[in-house]
């Protein structure tokens, strides 16, 4: 199902809530979630600072969550020995965390939360949502196909041009994505906010599945999604 994108613009970024419902969640202005993946060069320190400062114009609260689960598996399935895969993953996650913290500090906005994904795995809300994801991947062909497509796209940057991922590589990619999906489904339950918009700089293959259909696994009523992309060359505006 394809939805018409609704545009909310400013001088720094353009926001495109996926659907009418996502736009209504956006208008509530309760919370913005910025998800950051290790190794993604898009999320520079400066970009994070811009996103945080810009997001606080529209939302009462902003949190940044970075992935730190299944990162070592991405290296292992590309031929790294287990010990080296763990070391590379730990180094990448640490660098990502440092970049986020410096970006938040540069933004000059107190009260912005910075969290690792692993901080939530012991909570009842995360376990419930992760179980729903596992069931959906096992029983919902549409969800599974979109997740595989997203995993293949993620893996493409690590493969030679035209090379298809192996079954093990695809499984590792799906595991990585599945760990993040609770925040696309129900951030309010995970962070204790009334409503939330998860954002990324591109529309993902899972977006229409989770936010555009009326059956199967889909986002909670208080969960929205928006593509947020730069309108101008990156530069940090002067302090407000």
Image (spheres, helix red, strand yellow):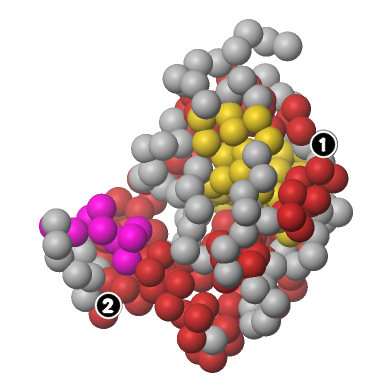
- Residue 71 coordinates in the image, percent (x, y): 39, 59
Taking the image as shown, residue 144 lies to the left or right of residue 80, namely: right
Please say whether residue 226 is visible from this viewpoint.
no
Residue 164, relative to residue 13: is it above or below? below
Tell me what residue is drawn at x 73 percent, y 11 percent. 240
Q: Which mark is residue 148?
A: none
Answer few, some or many: residues within 10 Å of disc 2's Cα (few below 14, many 20 plus, some between 14 and 19).
some
Total numbered circles = 2
Range of residues picked out in magenta: 152-160
Give the image location of residue 101, x and y in percent. 56, 32
The secondary element bearing badge 1 is classed as loop
Is 33 on the left or on the right of 228, as rendered?
right
Horizontal arrangement in the rendering, residue 42 relative to residue 132 (left or right): left
Residue 205 position in % (x across, y down) = 47, 63
The answer to whether residue 207 shows anywhere in this view is: yes
CB under 8 Å between discs 2 and 1: no
The quarter of the picture where the N terminus appears is bottom right
Of tags 2 and 1, which is closer to the observer? 1
Above/below status of 197 relative to 120: above
Looking at the picture, how far across and down is residue 220, in whole percent? 75, 67
Q: SS of the residue at dot 2?
A: helix
Give the spatial CA distance, label 2 vs label 1: 42 Å
Residue under circle 2? 168
Report the disc number at residue 60. 1
Can you name the residue that lies furthest to the bottom here?
139
Q: Tell which circle, 2 or 1, labels the residue nearer the N-terminal end.
A: 1
Which residue is pictured at 62% across the width and 59% down the height?
3
**Front position in the image: 48 or 105:** 48
Task: Check if residue 154 falls in the magenta segment.
Answer: yes
Residue at the spot x=67%, y=81% of the render? 215
Residue drawn at the location 68% of the way across and 35% of the way down:
8
Q: Judge the density around disc 1: few (<14), some (14-19), many (≥20) Cα neighbours within 10 Å.
A: few
């Amino acid at each position: 199902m394809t939805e018409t994108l609704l545009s909310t613009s400013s001088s720094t970024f353009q926001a495109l809530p996926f659907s009418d419902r996502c736009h209504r969640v956006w208008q509530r202005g309760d919370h913005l979630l910025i998800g950051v993946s290790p190794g993604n060069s898009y999320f520079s320190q400066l970009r994070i600072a811009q996103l945080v400062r810009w997001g606080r114009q529209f939302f009462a609260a902003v949190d940044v969550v970075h992935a730190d689960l299944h990162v070592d598996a991405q290296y292992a399935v590309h031929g790294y020995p287990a010990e080296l895969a763990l070391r590379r993953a730990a180094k990448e996650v640490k660098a990502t965390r440092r970049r986020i913290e410096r970006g938040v500090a540069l933004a000059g906005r107190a009260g912005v939360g910075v969290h690792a994904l692993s901080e939530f795995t012991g909570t009842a809300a995360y376990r419930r949502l992760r179980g729903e994801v596992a069931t959906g991947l096992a029983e919902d062909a549409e969800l599974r196909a979109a997740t595989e497509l997203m995993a293949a796209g993620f893996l493409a940057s690590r493969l030679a041009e035209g090379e298809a991922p192996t079954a093990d590589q695809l499984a590792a990619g799906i595991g990585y994505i599945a760990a993040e999906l609770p925040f696309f489904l129900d951030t309010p339950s995970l962070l204790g906010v009334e409503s939330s918009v998860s954002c990324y700089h591109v529309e993902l293959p899972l977006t229409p599945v989770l936010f555009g259909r009326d059956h199967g696994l889909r986002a909670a009523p208080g969960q929205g999604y928006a593509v947020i992309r730069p309108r101008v060359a990156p530069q940090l505006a002067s302090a407000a």
